[in-house]
Image (cartoon, rainbow, N blue to C red):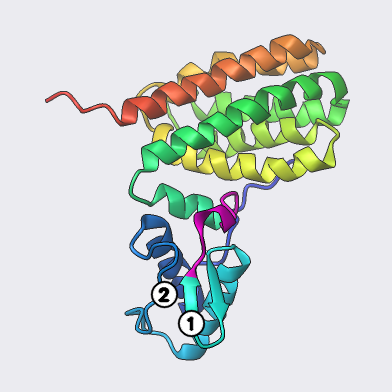
Amino acid sequence: MPPPHTARTGYPRGGLHGQVVHGIGRRILSGKIRPGELLPADMGLPASRTVVREAIKVLAAKGLVESRPKTGTRVSPRHKWNLLDPDVLAWQQDGASPVAFLSKLTEVRLIVEPAAAELAALRANPKEIEVIEGAFREMEAALGDGAEDYEAFDRADIVFHQGIVRACGNDLLQQMGQFVYSALLLSFAATSRLPGRAKESLPDHRAILNAIRGRQARRAGAAMRRLVRSTAREIESLSEPKQP
């Protein structure tokens, strides 16, 4: 099985159509346009009605808006939003309370990833373990020789976590792997540049790898739980007032 790719997911941002989709999506998720409210006729975007109409179709597919004859297009109730859509995840982070959102995201990771690590320890085949191990070695290399390449570290870390989900042998969990990828992207944007954070995470990553390689399911789950909880503490620290 080839290593999971790390290309950015979500709706393309280039071009006028993409700009309109992301522009309206951010306004909805930030609360500037609230559930039940009509989308303004003039969105203040340099786009034709045709472009806006096509953008609304994209947003409707994400559950964010509803169009009805004679009443126009309104923002859908929040319970209809596809909160795990990669774009909606990103727009939530751009919203009014990104730390609160990241905390919710980490709670979900804490439920999914330790269980995935346990299953991977029981089911991973040699090639899948090789992917996870190779990703860990790349993480180490990104921080070696005094040259800290955080982008390379982040890419390898994503492959590490996606490799674990893929090694579960469960296609439904593999779909959840896409959520894990999106969640990691957002968590990295908030925490991966904190001083010492990347290097401090290596022992837990190593423990996860060793447990999976040794077919020790409980140890794999416990090590993953430690890692995600560490991220949770880092996210909580972002909301603390900085010392003068």
Judging from the image, what secondary structure is the residue with disc 1 in?
Answer: strand
- On the image, the x and y values in percent for residue 233 come to 42, 21
Please state which amino acid type lies under the numbered disc 2: Leu
Write the residue at 69% across / 37% down: 162
Q: Name the residue under label 2.
A: 38
Secondary structure, mark 2, is loop
Q: Residue at x 40, y 29 (%)?
A: 235
Boundaries of the magenta span: 75-85
Question: Is residue 81 part of the magenta span, yes or no?
Answer: yes
Q: Which of 30 and 38 is in front in this view?
A: 38
* Quarter assignment of residue 23: bottom left
Image quadrant where residue 91 sits: bottom left
Q: Nearer the viewer, residue 47 or 34?
A: 34
Disc number for residue 72: 1
Please tell me whether residue 186 is drawn above or below residue 212 in the rendered image.
Answer: below
Identify which residue is drawn at 63% across, 14% down: 223
Task: Classify residue 155 as left or right of residue 221.
Answer: left
Is 101 covered by the magenta stretch? no
Q: Main secondary structure of the magenta part?
A: loop
Position of residue 151 relative to residue 116, above or below, is below
Inspect this view and state whether residue 2 appears.
Answer: no
Residue 141 rendering spot, x and y as whole percentages: 56, 27
Give the answer, above or below, for where 16 lies relative to 29. Answer: below
Q: Position of residue 45 (x, y in %)?
A: 36, 80
Question: Mark 1–mark 2 contact, CB under 8 Å?
Answer: yes
Which badge, 1 or 2, comes first in the chain's sequence?
Answer: 2
* Residue 164 visible at all: yes
